[in-house]
Image (cartoon, rainbow, N blue to C red):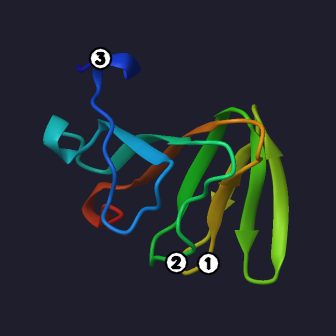
Amino acid sequence: MIIKRYSEVTPGTYEGVPEGVQLREMITERDGAPNFSLRVFDVQPGAGTPFHAHEWEHEVFILDGTGRVVTEGKEYPFKAGDAVYIAPNEQHCFVADSGMMVRFVCVIPSKNRCRL
């Protein structure tokens, strides 16, 4: 068993991720997790993750803040307490509203770690 505290995991970024977006890799294959990686993203007010797609699904749970998920041709508002499912190959990004930071948990397959 492994227990990690959010505040003790050093935030990082992926190549190509815009300024204002950080992530913490909370549990990954480096911890022995064979199937999934659990990450926490912090998106500063007005910032957003890159618009992208990947071959795997992922599930997101919004911990704090408000914003929108942008897909091809549509925007979906979200707030703390919402869960979001992103289908494989679905273009998407998460954008924080201008007055509020967004924090969310993202789960993806370990074998396909998201390298943006």
Residue topped by disc 1 = 90
- The reply, left or right, for residue 36 in relation to residue 101 is left
Earlier-in-chain disc, 1 versus 2: 2
- Cβ atoms at labels 1 and 2 below 8 Å apart: yes
Q: Give the Cα distance between marks 3 and 2.
A: 30 Å
The residue closer to the viewer here, 6 or 85, is: 6
Q: Report helix, strand or loop for mark 1.
A: loop
- 106 relative position to 14: left or right: right
Residue 5 visible in rendering = no
The location of residue 111, given as percent across then percent down, is 26, 62
Indicate the position of residue 52 as horizontal and vertical percent values. 53, 76
Alpha-carbon distance for marks 3 and 1? 32 Å
Q: Is residue 17 above or below residue 59?
A: below
Residues at discs 3 and 2 in contact (Cβ within 8 Å): no
Residue located 47% across and 61% down the image:
18
Q: Amino acid at mark 2?
A: Ala
- Residue 47 appears in view: yes
Task: Nearest to the eye among marks 3 and 2: give it.
Answer: 2
Q: CA distance from mark 1 to mark 2?
A: 5 Å
Q: Secondary structure at mark 2?
A: loop
Question: Which quadrant would residue 73 be assigned to in this image?
Answer: bottom right
Q: Earlier in the sequence, mark 3 or mark 1?
A: 3
* Relative height, residue 99 to residue 95 (above, below): above
Residue 26 picture location, percent across and down: 33, 33
CA neighbours of label 3 inside 10 A, class few (<14), some (14 to 19), many (20+):
few
Q: Residues within 10 Å of mark 1 (few under 14, many from 20)?
A: some
In this rendering, would 96 be left or right of 78? left
Q: Residue at x 43, y 44 (%)?
A: 22
Which residue is disc 3 drawn over?
3
Q: Amino acid at mark 1?
A: Glu
- At 46% from the left and 70% from the top, the residue drawn is 56
Give the numbered dot on residue 53. 2
